[in-house]
Image (tube, coloured by chain):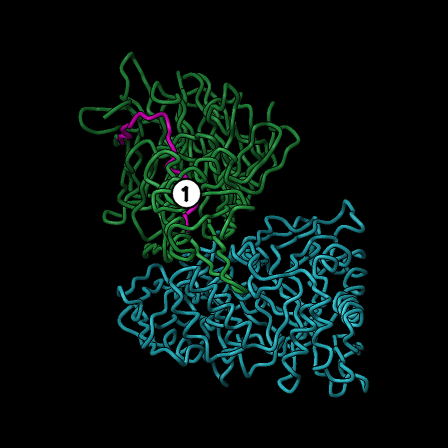
């Protein structure tokens, strides 16, 4: 998670949230009202449209129809310029806050200007799969000190009766004994020195005999069973960004920092460089892979294997993870929200539709800042770790999406 | 790193109108001092020394909750009273007080953009150390300051955000661009300024060009004594798109507005095209000769001044150019100036310009609750100011490949506390 303005988000002037799928009718109506107010009702009006924004031609067609319809209901006749009493120029612009629709209505030698602001973030409410989903968190583990990753294991045919916990210096295998947990084995990770204060780490488990642990500048690997036994190597090898070691995109992690430096590897990422990023998520886009990188500058980037393009997504924190489910479009992104280390966090599920982030679940609240969000082994769930501000403990949860309410 | 500017002070200029332009440098200021907030790339305020804020519905009272356990560079804890004192000095029009772990702003008129306003370098928190030396809480502390010549900044071990990775930053001031380029190419400097018009001319592999959004306005400032007709005629005569295309390789943004299009979204409403016929109609109201002065050390300003002068003469305006501080420039009524944006938030940016151009209109800027109102305020400020906007230019720097994790904001702000140098470099 990263800094958040707890404060208020206030809208400037006419600021129109979009409530439904690509529903531009409200701002279009408001701009039409402003035009009618300036030109006077009943006039013969010619409209010209100029797009200086990222709105698509389809958006523009919808907006134009909605505006013309509203103007006509108020008695305005839409005519060709040659027959017009007044020629109105409408420009769809954008600024740092969002879209700005501007109408210029001439009045003799002067002109009246009307504007409507449409927050760009609201475009995130375009239609997703249409299926409301439920994001649930299930407690996995908690402890006093920080830890970096956790994997629930299935041992002796029963799930949830064992747990791997990664700390900056150890991997510990716990087994359930009654209502508590016993340490089966704590394995010190050698070669791990000078880890950053807010270091990160990840475990990739393909089977109980194949565990890989990635820490800044160190990779350890070995079996969990029959005996947890890892060999470590000082290396800057790239980390898989998906939940399996054959991830098509891997990222080189900054040895002394808490983010990926942007240099990519893997079958899809080889030779490519993204801006430095905290986390990544993979979703499906028309049967192809689409990656999202959550940049250290707060900018989300899309990457489809060839092009890196900035996304118009705001409000996400620094942790994202992709999951594959049976719901909706079958792939969702879980994202923490922006915030500070002193405030509780939340995670919400989104689908990517036309390169827009569409929320498909409610937000699941945490007792403190989320410090870790990784896709869990298998790719269908995620693991989140928070630092509970009330108890002071670090807590791990499994995040699961279920379809429908 | 090297720079052309010759800032004489490292603490922010709290009285923008009386402080000479260029007496401080925002990049340096924000390495040493923190602000309550910072702006992200969408212009939204994010927490820095303040962790949250709230306001009354009428925007006349704002309460910012301060981050706990922040140390000043002398090792003492930053107190809310110090924050209030600093912000009171930089905001004389507001009443600023400390209350528990908060600072409270009260004003007679609504201030809708307070969080963005608090991100400006001029609102950085300055405490007074021994001998009244300004003390900050930023990632770097001043180890040596020779105003206008050299500065040495050292990493602050007690920085609340964690000690920066760089041990120190040495800044050489007053270096001409060509000298900076030589120093960069010979490895004497890791970060130098670069003329925007040079960015596309000599690409090389061993450097990275940092280019911000167009965030510095180049404009003609008119003396109060010059006739209004002269300002109108000059504005009508200048071919701004040609200046951007030819002199800036299209990296800038020709403008007739005070705020750039990417920031306001409505700059296109201010005309940028020349109308020589209308300019000629004003000839009878013009003086016999007009001098446009420019900084002779600034090659881009020189080229723009010459182009403006050419356009003006074609419209019948008898304009000559002269380098500032020369005999020819004595009594010049027109000055070509650079005005850097102080914020990526449109309201705060316009307020920043207003504080320099016409502080009387500041309240109108700060009460603008919609872009429509801001447009009206900008139009009024432009009509009443003695300024003709010409072009917005980006901030361009060359960065050595040994510098890692460099990030900067849309308007060219630096986040140097995240930067580290590749091994082998000092």
Q: Residue at x 48, y 47 (%)?
A: A298
Number of callouts: 1
Residue lying farthest to the left in this orientation: A179
Q: Quadrant of residue B186?
A: bottom right
Residue A78 vs residue A309: left or right? left
Q: Which of A93 and A246 lies nearest the eye of the viewer?
A: A93
- Residue A148 location in percent, x, y? 40, 37
The hue used for chain A is green
Mark 1 highlights which residue? A67
Q: Eyeballing the image, is A244 above or below B395?
A: above
Q: Position of residue A85 (x, y in %)?
A: 49, 52
The extreme top residue here reads A157
Front residue of A88 and B33? A88
Magenta range? A117-137
Q: Disc 1 on helix, strand or loop?
A: helix
> Does B37 appear above or below B387?
above
A149 vs B320, left or right, is left
């Amino acid at each position: 998670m990263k800094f958040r303005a707890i404060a208020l988000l206030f809208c400037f002037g006419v600021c129109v949230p979009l409530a439904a799928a690509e529903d531009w009718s409200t701002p279009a109506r408001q701009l039409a009202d402003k035009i009618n107010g300036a030109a006077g009702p009943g006039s013969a009006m010619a409209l010209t449209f100029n797009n200086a924004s990222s709105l698509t031609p389809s958006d523009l067609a919808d907006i134009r129809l909605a505006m013309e319809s509203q103007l006509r209901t108020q008695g305005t006749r839409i005519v060709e310029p040659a027959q017009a009493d007044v020629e109105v120029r409408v420009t769809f612009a954008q600024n740092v806050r969002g879209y700005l629709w501007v109408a210029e209505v001439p009045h003799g030698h002067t002109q009246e200007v009307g504007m409507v602001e449409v927050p760009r973030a609201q475009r995130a409410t375009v239609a997703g799969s249409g299926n409301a989903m439920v994001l649930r968190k299930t407690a996995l583990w908690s402890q006093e000190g920080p830890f970096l990753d956790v994997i629930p294991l299935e041992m002796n045919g029963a799930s949830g009766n064992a747990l791997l916990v990664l700390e900056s210096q150890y991997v510990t295998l716990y087994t359930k004994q009654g209502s508590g947990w016993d340490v089966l084995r704590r394995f010190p990770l050698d070669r791990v020195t000078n880890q950053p204060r807010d270091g990160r780490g990840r475990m990739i488990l393909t089977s109980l005999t194949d565990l890989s642990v990635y820490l800044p500048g160190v990779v350890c690997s070995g079996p969990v069973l029959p005996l947890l036994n890892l060999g470590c190597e000082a290396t800057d090898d790239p980390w898989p960004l998906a939940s399996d070691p054959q991830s098509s995109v891997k990222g080189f992690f900054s040895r002394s920092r808490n983010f990926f430096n942007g240099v990519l590897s893997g079958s899809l990422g080889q030779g490519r460089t993204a801006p430095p990023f905290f986390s990544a998520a993979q979703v499906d886009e028309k049967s192809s892979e689409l990656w999202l990188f959550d940049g250290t500058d707060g900018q989300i980037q899309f990457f489809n294997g060839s092009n890196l393009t900035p996304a118009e997504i705001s409000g996400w924190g620094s942790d994202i993870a992709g999951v594959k489910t049976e719901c909706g479009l079958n792939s969702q992104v879980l994202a923490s929200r922006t915030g500070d280390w002193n405030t509780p966090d939340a995670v919400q599920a989104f689908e990517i539709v036309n390169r827009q982030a569409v929320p498909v679940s409610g937000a699941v609240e945490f007792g403190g800042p989320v410090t870790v969000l990784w896709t869990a082994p298998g790719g269908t769930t995620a693991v989140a770790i928070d630092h509970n501000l009330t108890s002071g403990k670090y807590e791990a949860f499994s995040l699961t999406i279920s379809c429908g309410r | 790193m090297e720079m052309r500017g010759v800032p004489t002070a490292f603490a922010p200029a709290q009285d923008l109108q009386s402080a000479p332009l260029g007496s401080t440098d925002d990049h340096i200021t924000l390495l040493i001092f923190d602000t309550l907030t910072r702006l992200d790339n969408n212009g939204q305020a994010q927490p820095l020394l303040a962790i949250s804020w709230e306001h009354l519905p009428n925007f006349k009272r704002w309460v910012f909750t301060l981050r706990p356990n922040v140390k000043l560079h002398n090792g003492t804890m930053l107190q809310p009273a110090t924050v209030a004192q600093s912000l009171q000095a930089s905001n004389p029009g507001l009443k600023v007080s400390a209350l528990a772990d908060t600072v409270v702003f009260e004003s007679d008129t609504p201030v809708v953009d307070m969080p963005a306003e608090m991100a400006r370098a001029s609102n950085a928190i300055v405490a007074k150390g021994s001998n009244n030396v300004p003390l900050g809480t930023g990632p770097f502390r001043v180890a040596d300051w020779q105003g206008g010549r050299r500065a040495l900044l050292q990493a602050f071990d007690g920085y609340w955000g964690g000690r920066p990775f760089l041990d120190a930053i040495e800044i050489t001031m007053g270096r001409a661009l060509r000298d900076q380029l030589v120093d960069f190419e010979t490895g004497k400097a890791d970060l130098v300024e670069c003329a925007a018009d040079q960015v596309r001319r000599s690409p090389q592999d061993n450097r990275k060009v940092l280019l911000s959004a167009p965030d510095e306005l180049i404009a003609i400032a008119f003396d109060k004594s010059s006739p209004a007709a002269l300002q109108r005629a000059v504005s009508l005569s200048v071919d701004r798109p040609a200046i951007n295309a030819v002199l800036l390789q299209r990296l800038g943004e020709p403008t007739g507005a005070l705020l750039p299009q990417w920031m306001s979204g409505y700059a296109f409403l201010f005309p940028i095209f020349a109308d020589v016929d209308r300019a000629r109609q004003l000839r009878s109201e013009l003086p016999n000769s007009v001098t446009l002065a420019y900084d002779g050390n600034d090659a881009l300003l020189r080229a723009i001044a010459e182009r403006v002068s050419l356009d003006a003469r074609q419209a019948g305006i008898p304009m000559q150019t002269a380098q500032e501080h020369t005999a020819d420039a004595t009594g010049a009524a027109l000055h070509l100036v650079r005005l850097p944006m102080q914020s990526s938030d449109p309201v705060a940016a316009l307020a920043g310009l207003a504080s320099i151009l016409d502080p009387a209109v500041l309240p109108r800027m700060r009460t603008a609750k919609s872009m429509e109102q801001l447009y009206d305020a900008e139009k009024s400020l432009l009509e009443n100011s003695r300024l003709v906007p010409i072009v917005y230019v980006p901030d361009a720097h060359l960065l050595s490949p040994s510098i890692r994790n460099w990030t900067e904001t849309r308007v060219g702000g630096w986040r140097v506390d995240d930067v580290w140098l590749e091994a082998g470099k000092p």
